[in-house]
Amino acid sequence: MTTLTLSIVTVFVIGYLCIAVESLTKINKAAIALLMFVFCWTLFMLDPGSYIAGAVGDSIPLAVSEVIEKHLGSTATTLFFLMGAMTIVELVDQNGGFNFVRDMLKTRTKKALLWRIAVMTFVLSAILDNLTTSIVMIMILRKLVADKKDRMIYAALVIIAANSGGAFSPIGDVTTIMLWNKGVITAMGVITEIIIPSVVSMVIPAYILSLSLKGDLAEVEEEADDTSDDILSAGQRKAIFFLGVGGLIFVPIFKSITHLPPFMGILLVLGVLWTVTEIFYSSLPHDNEDENGNGMQKRITKMLARIDMGTILFFLGILMAVACLETIGVLESLGEGLNVAFNGNHYLVTGIIGVLSSIVDNVPLVAGCMGMYPVEATGDMAVDGVFWQLLAYCAGVGGSMLIIGSAAGVVVMGLEKITFGWYMKKITWIAFIGYLAGIIVYWVEKMFLF
């Protein structure tokens, strides 16, 4: 490893540690992530020719611009997906769309609510995706759980259940979508062989967390501005719900039909929903809208202004900083080193990759693995082989071990203001037990069932 490469890695590690101790430094994680992003790429520019093949002389600036713009484009798809999904879910929620889901989950007992949240999150994340599901469940939790400490435990379970539910579904997580599109796993193969390990990785943490919840839930006061029933008709609210949730379900279908990136499907749904709601609210009496202030407040233009830009900028910084590590070859070297160190034991290799996915973004890790390991006709590296299926499981579920290890964790962190330190102290070991149990269950399956 060259001095320059070591310097870039050092900046990333220092930045990561600052994010980890945000509760002590009181410096917003988004600010640190942006500094990591800029400093890593600034150091990269000291000698870009050593990392970019063919970049010499006057061609270096152009080559570097192409590399950064490529990674920025990939990052932007995640950011636009996140913004679109958050806006759609917020719109549906503000107009009473999730009231029936809330009513299904409503119970007086804390433990009963925990299991209902776990099952609902797990199922929804397989149908939608773990990011969108997490946003939906947090919105519902705010209406059901008044106590902040209890809600943090439920929110942590949402992260675990969302990542576990997304791991066995070809459309439930970005990494499984990548592997599915690459053709190294099949939809039926990953569902049948990974679903039981995924369930185990959710059930065990849920049981452990349930031990810390006792008694009944306190009543939650309805929000003062929750007067959507007085503004839109029941039919209009149902239309918004079905357009919003149905649109989110339609996104993977849109992708499979058009082969366009998922964020374009999200923007399509957002555009349709935006148009429909504008028509609904434009038909309201003007004086009614002004009197309550709700007609304007519940329009998408107002909700866009309330998007948590801190979370968006944190995503930008962390993904672009990781992209720099990918460009200088650190991630690829790490993967090769793991393969050599563990003598091709794919249970250990993918297990370590899963742990790493809780530290750095799992997308470049999986992308690096796909480029590093060739698909073989038979054995562990064949289509639906042990390596690829375990990679889908480990990269998805492994992200639950740290709150910044997955998109679901990052968005819940932003919405519920959960600190990195609290999650690491209270939840990391619980998520790890579930993660390890799932790998063991998969090994048992391969030994005796498949």
Image: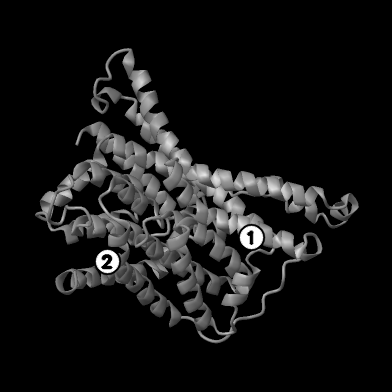
> Which of marks 1 and 2 precedes in the sequence?
2
Quadrant location of residue 72?
Answer: top left
Q: Residue furthest top?
A: 58
Q: Name the image quarter holding the C terminus.
A: bottom left
Q: Secondary structure at mark 2?
A: helix
Q: Is residue 223 left or right of residue 292?
A: left
Q: Residue at x 23, y 57 (%)?
A: 384
The residue that disc 1 covers is 241
Quadrant location of residue 37?
Answer: top left
Q: Secondary structure at mark 1?
A: helix
Q: Residue furthest front?
A: 257
Q: Is residue 261 visible?
A: no
Q: Residue at x 42, y 47 (%)?
A: 256
Label 1 is placed on what type of residue? Answer: Phe
Q: Name the image quarter holding the N terminus.
A: top left
Query: Disc 2 versus disc 1: distance between alpha carbons?
Result: 33 Å
Residue 7 drawn above or below residue 182: above
- The x and y percentages for residue 330 are 25, 40
Label 2 is placed on what type of residue? Answer: Glu
Residue nearest the observer in this picture, 348 or 385: 385
Residue nearest the observer in this picture, 295 or 253: 253
Q: Residues within 10 Å of mark 1 (few under 14, many from 20)?
A: many
Residue nearest the observer in this picture, 426 or 73: 73
- The x and y percentages for residue 269 are 58, 48
- The x and y percentages for residue 212 are 46, 81
Q: Which mark is residue 193?
A: 2
Q: Which mark is residue 192?
A: none
- The x and y percentages for residue 43 are 34, 30
Q: Is residue 289 visible?
A: yes
